[in-house]
Amino acid sequence: MPRRLIGLLPETSFLRKLSILASGTVLGQALVILSSPLLTRLFTPAEFGLFAVFAGLAGIVGGLAGLRYEFAIPVMETDDDAAALTVVAVLAGLLTTLVLASLIWAFGAWFADMVNTPALGPWLWLLPPAVLVWGLGSALTYWSVRRRTYKINAVNRTLQLGSQAGSQVGLGFLGTGGVGLIMGYTLGYVVRFGHFLYRLPAADRRLLTTQPLDTLWRRARDNWRYPVFGFPSAAFQSICQHAPAILLAALYGPMLAGFYALSQRIMGLPVRMLSEAGAKVFIGEIRDIESAHLHRYFMRITFLFLSIGLVGALPLIFYAPQLFAFVFGQPWLQSGEITRLLIPLYLSKFLEQPVSIILYYFNKQHLHFISTAINFTALIASFSIGHIFSLEAHTTILIFSLTSGASFLITLMISWRLAHRANIVRPA
């Protein structure tokens, strides 16, 4: 049995590339972890709630800025096609930023009042620059993945997270309140984009800046499935990830949103450290894997992440409240209780994210759209039930965790089925 289990692990090549790409995230997240006990003593739960609403909005819009064209960059047949799509993603990010700025001008103050955070109103103007550098950085991230410059990606992630953590702590000592968390968060994405731009080779820079307009249009048109199916899927997925804090602020106040934000910050660590890196390695390597071996490769990666996820979840099931109270201070004990409730959601997401990207490789974005629509429906239904029946916040969070976790498992099963049939179906 042990030999069979070991045999399910991915080959050394995947583990090596995963370790390189994840190392930057691990180092960066180590700084986040070290800074968190300081932040929870420098900022109140209500100030964390203010930041959670801003970060939620930035996460929703920033992750969609490129219209999902960036996902096609690593799998293009030629570098010219990939470069054209990189530029398309950049232009999409510019357009998204302009639309966002118009919406803030028209509805910013109204939105801040609606979610019980009126102090956020003036600082919503930091959203457009944050989204812009987020979108530009994402396009260059996937260009780097295509080039397989995983070490640059690793350093970049360290710089982003390290600058966020360091600046938030520094601004906290200056007594800036929740605005300090927002400014530090935005600075991290500025550093991320600047580093990618600095490390971009001269040849790549010329290739990206000399793409003719007609080529950009053709590549955007040929890969229409990414914005048509991938964008709505990503919108649902991004809303499900970032909107809960906003909804909690609206229904239960910014303090509860702050407790949730700290739980999300900690529970998201393994997803950000390993799961996202695994997805990037998987999409970067998949085009070189033979059809007959793809299913086994899929299963090995899934087993690896299942093993890691279970090991990480067990201590939190029994001791999360005590750990949070000890590490972050007694006022944050409720965050530990929320963390327990979020285990079904984050464990299933940890399994699904590295391998579900196979749907994009096989041009099955519509399947991903269906699964994310189910997740979105679960989000809306959970908080609607909580609001209609005046449920306690923890009950609403548990319903959301269970239903969303189930939707991630549905996506995992769809991805498994596609990998299983890979010896019959290949992407066009």
Image: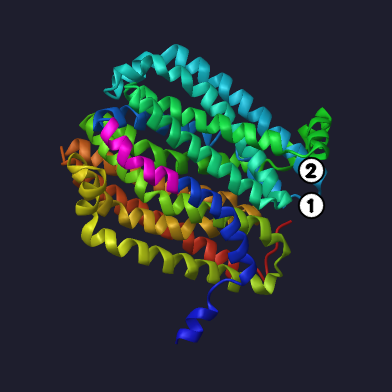
Q: Residue 317 placed where, x, y %?
A: 25, 60
Magenta stretch bounds: 30-42
What's the CA distance linking mark 1 and mark 2?
Answer: 7 Å
Between 265 and 238, the residue placed more toward the observer is: 265
The tag on residue 231 is none
Residue at the spot of label 2: 81
Q: In the image, is residue 307 part of the stretch drawn in magenta?
A: no
**Is residue 347 visible in this depiction of the protein?**
yes
Tag 1 secondary structure: loop
Q: Quadrant of the C terminus?
A: bottom right
Q: Residue 116 placed where, x, y %?
A: 26, 23
Q: Residue 81 placed where, x, y %?
A: 79, 43
Residue name at image x 40 percent, y 28 percent: 170
Type of amino acid under label 2: Asp
Q: In the image, is residue 31 part of the stretch drawn in magenta?
A: yes
Residue name at image x 48 percent, y 23 percent: 127
The tag on residue 77 is 1
